[in-house]
Image (tube, rainbow, N blue to C red):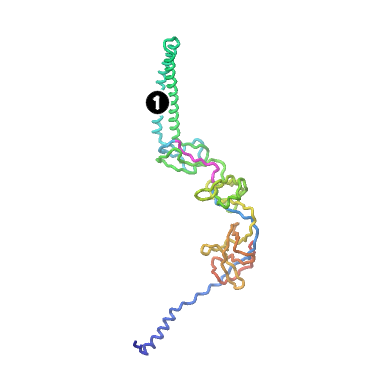
Amino acid sequence: MTRLPHRLSVLLLPLIALVGIGCTKPPDAPLPVRSVRTLLAAASKTESEHVYAGEVRPRYESNLSFRVSGKIQRRLVNVGDKVKTGDLLLQLDVKDLALSEAASQATVQAQQARFAVEKADFERYGKLAATGYISKTEYDRQKTHFQAAKAELESVKAQARVSGNQTTYAALRADADGTITAIEAETGQVVTAGQTVVKVAKAGEMEVAADVPEQGVRQLKAGMAMEVSLWTKGSQRFPASLRELALSADPATRTYPIRVHVSNPPADMKLGMSASVIVPSGDLATVFRIPLAAIVQRQGVAGVWMFDADTGTVKFKVVKIVGVADNDALVGEGISSGERIVTAGAMLLHEGQQVKLMSADQPAG
């Protein structure tokens, strides 16, 4: 191998040095010292409770359907309409039903004529039997024909009444005062007998429907006291009681439906409103109340920043939130009494960052 000339090597050495300097990564800029507000954690005893999402529903709701099959000709109501007992809701096309009724009436008229003939013969045979012109056997045979004609006439009359009723069944009417909550069929649609087409919430009492998971069913008893809050009312709560608890779980959700009676519902409570059912557990739990602003999420895990007085830095610590009260989070695990928690400025912090306290500590109870 040939050696590089001495002069060439002298020229390349400074260039190599410059390339090495350009590839060196500059040091990371230090994190700024941020001002934060903290408080000292202090445990307190509070009655634990379970909260379940619910919806305001009517206590009585009717799923209305036609008693005959047919094609819907008219729809006279919309969702939200107020209806009275007997109001016409939907109407089927009655052409085929009317033809069936006419055929039944024609059958009745034909059978009435036949019955009139059998009745006249029976009366004549009775007179002849009384004078001895015919035997008793002939009289009994005519009597049987008369009774058969009479029974057949009653049968076709009953069939005619059924056909007449079916014509009236083509009109779907409200069975009680209430509000239309759902319409599941439209004009032109062919529906079958028994198929739900309209839902009517009967006027009167409203309640809250919710679903309770399997682990929460044990403590529930019919009539037990609980509370209900409406999302439109913020943190305001209303006394309530458990009216109904399903004996079996819903096969799809594996939860148990419950119905809660609200003792004194607000005047503006309406059907379909979102609500929460608060069930007290009866146990006193040790919790830490800290502001919701202190809770941060890191990689989908809830936690808080703990202040280390020795180093002046913060450290992330995972916590378990067991509930919410007003603007505070109730922490059941992850915090010990006396620890200092960052409550203001938590969203801007990083692990091990230097911080500066803004104010005196306040205990979190």
Give whichever of 189, 322 is nearer the camera.
322
Q: Which residue is mark 1?
A: 107
Instruction: Tell me the quarter of the picture where residue 313 sits.
Output: bottom right
Q: Residues within 10 Å of mark 1 (few under 14, many from 20)?
A: some
On the image, the x and y values in percent for residue 144 come to: 43, 19
Which SS does the magenta portion mostly show?
Answer: strand
The amino acid marked with disc number 1 is Thr
Q: Which residues are magenta?
A: 56-67
Q: Is residue 122 left or right of residue 300?
A: left
Asked if residue 205 is among those painted magenta in the image, a careful observer would answer: no
229 shown above or below 27: above
| Vertical order, 167 against 205 (above or below) | above
Relative image position of residue 256 (x, y in whole percent): 55, 48
Q: Pinpoint residue 36: horizontal percent, then vertical percent.
A: 58, 68
- Residue drawn at the location 45% of the way across and 11% of the way down: 130
Q: Quadrant of residue 109?
A: top left
Between 362 and 165, which is closer to the camera in this rendering?
165
View extreme (top): residue: 131
**Outermost residue, bottom side:** 6
Does 60 lie within the magenta span?
yes
- Helix or strand or loop: what does disc 1 sit on? helix
The quarter in which the N terminus is drawn is bottom left
Q: Residue shown at 45%/43% (left/top)?
A: 184
Q: Quadrant of the C terminus?
A: bottom right
- 203 lies above or below 334: above
Image position, residue 349 (x, y; %): 54, 68
- Callout count: 1
